[in-house]
Image (cartoon, rainbow, N blue to C red):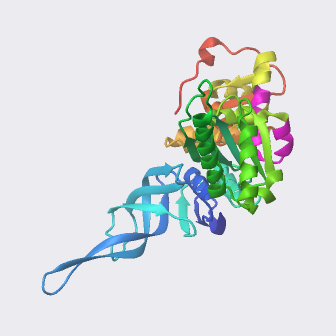
Amino acid sequence: MKLIDRSFDKDGSGQVTLLPEDPEDMWHAFNLVAVGDSLRSTTIRKVQNESATGSVSSSKIRTTLTVTIETIDFDTAACVLRVKGRNIQENQYVKMGAYHTLDLELNRKFTLAKECWDAIAIDRIEQACDIEKKADVAALVMQEGLAHLCLLTGSMTVVRAKIETNIPRKRRGSCEQHDKGLGRFYESVMQAILRHVNFEIVKCVLVASPGFVKDQFCEYMFSQAIKTDCKIITENKSKFLLVHSSSGFKHSLKEVLQDPSVTAKLADTKAAGEVKLLEQFYIMLQHEPDRAYYGIKHVESASESEAIETLLISDRLFRAQDVPTRRRYVALVEKVKDLGGDVKIFSSLHVSGEQLDQLTGVAAILRFPIPEIDEEDATDSDED
């Protein structure tokens, strides 16, 4: 993401002009826009023209519109962001108050204006514009007949390909059909890697499976690469790291990222850091429950006692359409930071973020134990 311009007033209002440069930037944009904001961007509008003879012709015109956002839709697979709202600036093609849907596109700038830019939104802009925080890890989790190829970035885990192949069972005295099915499956997985993994950016490809599936696949892939003179695979052979997983499903990524050999290799990536922190929270919850709390009421009580050492919070909570709810979470984050605590915002598109969402989306590791909160205070009211 490229920051082209920004201007903020003393009352917190203002606008920024951004240029999304890769699909992950759309995820950042999705976390920035909110219902009630105004968005200005170019779009295609169908215009009808009536000639002097009365005949009507229609043409598509590219024009610039400013809308007040009413609905937001984000397609995680295609990384496409659509916002719908009413036009608030007179335009020769679109009347004031008319509805229009804007598609935010790569390499096309947009201007977002808010009545109040809070610390979370400003941090998000800085994070999006940091060139170092880009995708650099690919992960292949597989079992016989099933594979998921994922790309891990600082903010997302995106499934780029799901490969399913029906592999016949081994029969007594004959394994031919089974071996043929396995060969077709391995070939499909190899083609998916060639199609979706950019080895100029990706510094590590994790290959995980139960048993020896990963070893057999890599043996097949490297031998095929030599036979077909596929230099992309042979030149990047050192980037492949084989690890164990319990299955070929996406949720197995969590245990893959916890593997010590993987942690060492990916020490500087945000994804591994989130998994490690969440694991630390679970250990604390098990052995020192008075120093690990989750749920907004619990965590706010710990914050009042100035006890929070590390706050774990999901970015999903900052997308709340209810402004007071969002402000409540923003206030919690700012208070923890002011008291010297560490704040980690988890992406809800990472496996670790999905797990944190199951714990209400907010949790805290404390500096010191605090007494158990009364049952009536401990009952969380779901704010979402």
Characterize the magenta stretch by its predominant secondary structure. Answer: helix
Nearer to the camera, 220 or 79: 220
Which residue lies most toward the left here? 53
Nearer to the camera, 226 or 16: 226
Residue 40 in percent (x, y) is at 48, 66
Q: Residue at x 59, y 18 (%)?
A: 379
Residue 267: say if magenta: yes
Nearer to the camera, 246 or 181: 181
Residue 205 in percent (x, y) is at 75, 48
Asked whether residue 118 appears in the rendered view, the answer is no
Nearer to the camera, 101 or 338: 101
Which residue lies most toward the top here? 375
Residue 3 in percent (x, y) is at 66, 67
On the image, which quarter does residue 342 sit in? Answer: top right
On the image, which quarter does residue 298 sit in? Answer: top right
- The magenta segment is 261-281
Q: Residue at x 78, y 40 (%)?
A: 242
Q: Residue at x 50, y 50 (%)?
A: 75
Asked whether residue 148 appears in the rendered view, the answer is yes
Q: How many marks?
A: 0
On the image, which quarter does residue 28 sit in? Answer: bottom right
Residue 321: say if magenta: no
Locate residue 344 relative to residue 178 in the image: left or right: right
Q: Quadrant of the N terminus?
A: bottom right
Which residue lies most toward the front here? 173
Locate residue 92 relative to residue 107 in the image: left or right: left
Residue 318 in percent (x, y) is at 59, 43
